[in-house]
Amino acid sequence: MTAATLDDLKARYPGAETFTFGDGRALCDELLALVRAGRKTATCGALRDFQEGVEAMPKVGRRDIALDWDGNPALVIETVEVTIRRFSDVDTGFALAEGENETLEGWQEDHRLYFERNGGWSPEMELVCERFRFIEDLGS
């Protein structure tokens, strides 16, 4: 997609931020597919990344544009809830809403590995936990 298309989307969704799920092409593709299938209705990130400006803090009611790994607009989500909690305090309900695992223990293992690859992990680390609803598939 061209920059004009992204500009058009930002005009359609005022205040929208852009972001990419995951830390590699395969994970990004998997997570986009889970959102499209209705299985992924939540996501989280390390609070440190939001404080350092790596990621834009989600805001309830804002619609944001998820990009594919190549930077093309893939889909639009709307944030419905934002909480900050320690990794060790993430409950089964939130973990399963992320759509990637069938158990809290599986979520803990996969996310521990993810955070270890991306700046470090601790059970006490704070996470920005976001619930969202799927708004539009941009056909990417």
Image: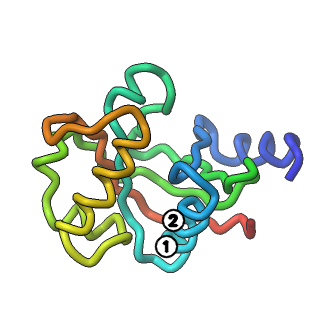
Give the residue pinned by disc 2: 31
- Please state which amino acid type lies under the numbered disc 2: Leu
Foreground residue among 8 and 70:
70
Q: Which mark is residue 34?
A: 1
Give residue 28's position: percent from left, percent from top: 57, 59
Residue 60, quarter of picture: top left
Q: Residues within 10 Å of mark 2 (few under 14, many from 20)?
A: many
Describe residue 9's horizontal placement relative to residue 14 as left or right.
right
- Please state which amino acid type lies under the numbered disc 1: Leu
Q: Relative to residue 15, is residue 6 depicted above or below?
A: below
Residue located at (24% from left, 63% from top): 95
Q: Residues within 10 Å of mark 1 (few under 14, many from 20)?
A: some
Determine contact: label 2, label 1, CB under 8 Å.
yes
Q: Relative to residue 59, is residue 110 depicted above or below?
A: below
Q: Which mark is residue 131?
A: none
Describe residue 112's horizontal placement relative to residue 5 as left or right.
left
Residue located at (66% from left, 52% from top): 67
Residue located at (41% from left, 76% from top): 39
Mark count:
2
Residue 119, quarter of picture: top left
Describe residue 86's horizontal placement relative to residue 121 as left or right.
left
SS at badge 1: helix
SS at badge 2: helix
Q: Relative to residue 124, is residue 44 depicted above or below?
A: below
Q: CA distance from mark 2 to mark 1?
A: 5 Å
Give residue 92's position: percent from left, percent from top: 15, 66
Give residue 3's position: percent from left, percent from top: 85, 41
Q: For the C terminus, give its image quadrant.
A: bottom right
Q: Relative to residue 61, is residue 101 depicted above or below?
A: below
Describe residue 92's horizontal placement relative to residue 131 as left or right.
left
